[in-house]
Amino acid sequence: FHKKNKSKISMVRIAASYEDLNYLKPIVKILKSKDYTVCINLMKFTLLNDNQIISFFKKALEVGCENFYVADSFGCFKPNQVKKLCLLLAKNNFALSKFGYHGHNNFNLAFENAIQFEKNGFGLIDTSIMGMGRGAGNLLFEKFLNKKIDKLKKNLIKKFIQKHMNKLKKNFSWGPSYPYEYSAKNNIHPTYVQNLLNEKKFTFKQIYQILKFLKLNNSKKFDANIFD
């Protein structure tokens, strides 16, 4: 990284699991010395208990992170769980306006979750056009902004989708499906599902059998040996 004043980047966002906490301080120190705003993105937060979530963000705040994200890596978080998480963070004196939500759409609930997070005070919401993203994809940009922008901007987005995005969607087929829903219910890392679908040689029944095997074999982290 160059100094911020020589870069087009203003914020650096670090994607980290709970286990990466001890590596955070030196990375943040280097980025802060170059004048970047630093954001921490807690992956797989749905696997953690309340104490782990709070201790992670307290440490991140202590070492200099200024914005904080919860990333629903398995796409299994539900709207009725949002308020509880927000109350937990607020109770521990975190400013919710500094928090963001990164949703995966395995249950097709990224939009509902985002609305609830926004209502409860989160200041940052991730979106992508047509929900473009790995596997089940992310929160749809155009759906989230539908009631927030005027007709002219809606038309510009529509034209962009027609010109650039429809072809990509056809080629890469991201979005919710039963295998991604099953992986979300059973905390199976989405890369397993993505690789199975990319192989294009397995029947639906075979994919289901493989996912049942992965469910029984602690597949929260992707392991290429297990996949092979």
Image: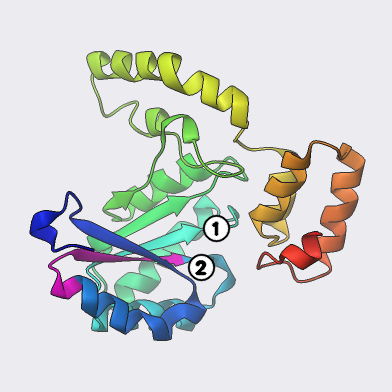
Query: Residue at the spot x=53%, y=20% of the render?
Result: 167
- For the residue pair 117 and 168, the one nearer the viewer reads as 168
Residue 181 appears in the figure: no
Count of marks overlaid on the render: 2
Left or right of 93? Residue 129 is right
Q: Which residues are magenta?
A: 32-42
Callout 1, which amino acid? Answer: Ser
Q: Which residue is mark 1?
A: 73
Indicate which disc, 1 or 2, sits on the residue closer to the N terminus: 2
The CA span between labels 1 and 2 is 8 Å
- The N terminus - image quarter: bottom left
Disc number at residue 45?
2
- For the residue pair 211 and 76, the one nearer the viewer reads as 211
- The C terminus - image quarter: bottom right
Q: Splitting the image into 4 quarters, where does residue 144 fall?
A: top left
Callout 2, which amino acid? Answer: Phe
